[in-house]
C-alpha cells in the first residue's frame, strides 16, 4: 500500500538527454551502517545498468593523505577542463571525500547567488551519475536549483522514525523538495513487515500534519537484488541533472502543499 508505483516502462521516462550529468542524493544518518550498505548496493546496481558512478561522500573529510573534492576545487588545472582519468575506475566505484568541498561550494553559491551543483560539472562530466551522500543539513543547500528527490533510509524503531522525520524537515525547509523514504527489511517476516508498515504510516502522518505534504515510501528487502534494483531505478527517475545551463524539473514545494581520489567498494 505504501510502496511507490513501478512498472516495466518506468526506465523509458527519461527527463534529460544522456549528455547531461544526473544527480542522485542520499541523506546520511547517524547510524550509518545499514544506510551505507544500501548505498553501495544501489551504486553497484546503477553501474550494472551501464552508468559510470562517482560518489561524493560528505561524511568523509578531505585530508592530505586522503584528498578529495576540496583538492579538486583548489587546483587550477582542474578548472581548465581536465577530466578524471576513468582508466582503472571504469569497473569500480569511485568514492571521493567531499565534506569540506561541499561547504566551499555552498558558501560560494550563496555569495554569488548561483546554482551550487553547477560547480561540479567541469570535474565530473565524464561520469553518468553523481551520488551525493551527506547529512540532510548539507544536502539541502546543495540541492537548490534542482529537482533531485533525495533518498532517506529509515533506521529501525522510533529512533529511526524520528531521525528520518528530522531529515525530511531539514530538506523541505531548505529546498521545498519532497523526499523518498526507504525502510529496510532484513528478515522479511510477517511481523517485521507489520512493524515497518506501522513505522512508515507514523512517519507519513507526521509529515502530512507538520510539513504540509505526503511522503513517498517504499520497503526494500536488503537480500533481494530485485528490490535493490527497483530502488536504483526509482532514484534514477528522480534524479536531477547538471548541464551547461543547469536544467531541471521544477521542484514540488513540500512546505506549501583524478585516479588517486578513488576508493573501491
Image (cartoon, grey):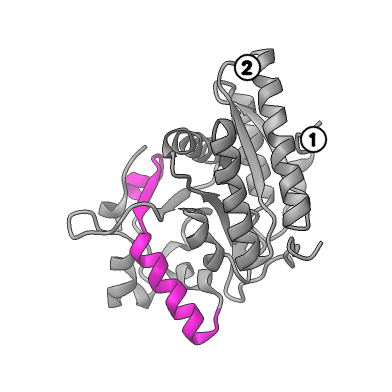
Which image quarter: residue 200? top right
Is the residue 246 above or below the residue 9 in the image? below
- The secondary element bearing badge 1 is classed as loop
- Does residue 233 belong to the magenta stretch? no
> Looking at the image, which is closer to me, 163 or 261?
163
Bounds of the magenta span? Answer: 86-114
Q: Residue furthest left?
A: 65
Q: Earlier in the sequence, mark 1 or mark 2?
A: 1
Residue drawn 72% across the image and 28% down it:
197
Q: Residue furthest bottom?
A: 112
Is residue 152 shown to the viewer in this render? no
Horizontal and vertical percent position of residue 167? 57, 52
Horizontal and vertical percent position of residue 178? 70, 55
Q: Which residue is mark 2?
A: 188
Is the residue 143 above or below the residue 204 in the image? below
Residue drawn 36% across the image and 76% down it:
79
Q: Say whether residue 157 is left or right of residue 134.
A: right
Is the residue 9 above or below the residue 214 in the image? above
- The secondary element bearing badge 2 is classed as loop
Is residue 170 shown to the viewer in this render? yes
Q: Which residue is mark 1?
A: 7
Amino acid at each position: 500500500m505504501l510502496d511507490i508505483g513501478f512498472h516495466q516502462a518506468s526506465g523509458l521516462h527519461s527527463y534529460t538527454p544522456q549528455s547531461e550529468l544526473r544527480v542522485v542524493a542520499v541523506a546520511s544518518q547517524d547510524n550509518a551502517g545499514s544506510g551505507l550498505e544500501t548505498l553501495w548496493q544501489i551504486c553497484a546496481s546503477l553501474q550494472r545498468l551501464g552508468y559510470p558512478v562517482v560518489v561524493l561522500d560528505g561524511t568523509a573529510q578531505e585530508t592530505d593523505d586522503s584528498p578529495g573534492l576540496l583538492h579538486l576545487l583548489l587546483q587550477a588545472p582542474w578548472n581548465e577542463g581536465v577530466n578524471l582519468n576513468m582508466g582503472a575506475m571504469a569497473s569500480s566505484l569511485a568514492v571521493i571525500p567531499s565534506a569540506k568541498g561541499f561547504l566551499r561550494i555552498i558558501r560560494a553559491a550563496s555569495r554569488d547567488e548561483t546554482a551550487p551543483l553547477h560547480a561540479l560539472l567541469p570535474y565530473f562530466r565524464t561520469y553518468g551519475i553523481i551520488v551525493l551522500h551527506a547529512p540532510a543539513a548539507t544536502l539541502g543547500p546543495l540541492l537548490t536549483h534542482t529537482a533531485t528527490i533525495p533518498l532517506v533510509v529509515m533506521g529501525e524503531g522510533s529512533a529511526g522514525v524520528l531521525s528520518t522525520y528530522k531529515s525530511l524537515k531539514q530538506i523541505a525547509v531548505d529546498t521545498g523538495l519532497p523526499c523518498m523514504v526507504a525502510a529496510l527489511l532484513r528478515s522479511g517476516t510477517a511481523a517485521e513487515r507489520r512493524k515497518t508498515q506501522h513505522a512508515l504510516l507514523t512517519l507519513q502522518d507526521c509529515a502530512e500534519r507538520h510539513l504540509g505534504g505526503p511522503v513517498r515510501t517504499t520497503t526494500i528487502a536488503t537480500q533481494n537484488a530485485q528490490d535493490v534494483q527497483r530502488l536504483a531505478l526509482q532514484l534514477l527517475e528522480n534524479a536531477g541533472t547538471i548541464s551547461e545551463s543547469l536544467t531541471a524539473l521544477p521542484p514540488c514545494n513540500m512546505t506549501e502543499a583524478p585516479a588517486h581520489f578513488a576508493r573501491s567498494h
